[in-house]
Image (cartoon, rainbow, N blue to C red):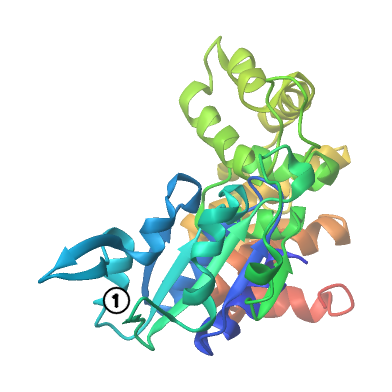
Amino acid sequence: MKASMVEVLLEKAIRGFRPVLLVGAPGVGKTSLTDQVRDRLKCDMLVSHPVVNDPTDAKGMPAIVKGKALFLPFGDLEYVISYKGELLIWLLDDIGQAPPAVQASYMQLLLARRINGHKLPNSVVFVAATNRRGDRAGVSGVLEPVKSRFHMIIELEADAEDLIKWGMKTGKLRKEVCALLRLFPELLIEPPAKDIKPSVCPRVWEFCSQTLDDFDNTEHLFSALCSTIGDGPAAQLYGLMTVFRDLPTVASIKKSPEGAKLPEKPSGFHAMSTVLSKHLGKHPEDVSPIFSYVERMPGDFAVCTIRDTLTIRPELADTEAFQKWNAKNVGLFI
């Protein structure tokens, strides 16, 4: 299931205090997607890592108090039991890597919402995340009675367009990375490598954007890219960057939208599309000349540019420039 759909289901489940288990390959965005929902709901989130926990973390530390044997909550459990806010997402991250005894220790909390006389507040909702058994992530499985306690088990799949949309909106993906993934969506994620070498996934493409920030216009750029995303994807990205250098400048497009040079190849149009949408994200006042230039682009690339621009700046849909373009291209923009 794509991230855009998972986000809808996850938010609905959290609002209804239904426990959810997210399943997916390493780096596809399970934790960050939960954090995005938390940000939209403006609530609190506690992230626990059962893989480094002991069963006592979920049931409390045994102690003698006034001659009676009790389990005293500590750490995350103590925080949750004493929580006084309106909504707390308790994220059990990488639960599939936890030993069976640790997984089992959360069973009563997940369903009965109490353990050893300690009751969870009604404002607490569980979300758990795990990789799959075939991901080479050390996951041997999730216990059946643990699995059956989740209201939904949602498998998150990587999707290039969803990642590009997220990268455009947040500014966390460089324009070169967005253009490459649109040209070659099959590069988004690779099967786990048997050797200790880079394997691309959505998380690694964000790292790649940071590598570009650190090494752009230096002699070490290609080596840095190879170390981040591997030799093959690095060669393709490095080649695409030469296309960016041959594009007309935004200044020349603003000066003469009707006369500025158009790219000659599809790779150039993909690059131009990301450049223009990123520019309008920062300078929405340039919408009129930019959209006039976009009107000269082939239909598919014009739609990509407009769509990405509206993802970053939805308010531009109310401008005269967009209304004019939309009226002429109503059959394209659906």
Residue drawn at 63 percent across, 68 percent down: 146
Residue drawn at 65 percent across, 81 percent down: 151
Residue 263, position as x, y percentages in the image? 80, 40
45 with respect to 51 (left or right): left
Residue 185, position as x, y percentages in the image? 82, 46
Depicted 177 relative to depicted 148: above or below: above
190 with respect to 110 (left or right): right
- The residue under label 1 is 81
Depicted 113 relative to depicted 209: above or below: below
Few, some or many C-alpha atoms within 10 Å of disc 1 (few <14, some 14-19, many ≥20)? some
Residue 56, position as x, y percentages in the image? 37, 57
Q: How many numbered markers are drawn? A: 1
Q: 220 and 205: which one is in front?
A: 205
| Res 285 seen here | no
Q: 5 and 58: which one is in front?
A: 58
**Residue lying at the far top of the rendered structure:** 219
Which three-letter amino acid code belongs to the residue tagged 1?
Ile
324 with respect to 223 (left or right): right
Q: 289 and 80: which one is in front?
A: 80
* Badge 1 element: helix
Question: Which quarter of the figure has residue 302?
Answer: bottom right
| Res 14 seen here | yes
97 with respect to 120 (left or right): right
**Residue lying at the far front of the rendered structure:** 67
**Residue lying at the far left of the rendered structure:** 66
On-image quarter of the C terminus: bottom right
Residue drawn at 54 percent across, 71 percent down: 107
On-image quarter of the N terminus: bottom right
Q: 309 and 66: which one is in front?
A: 66
Residue 240, position as x, y percentages in the image? 75, 29
Depicted 268 relative to depicted 333: above or below: above
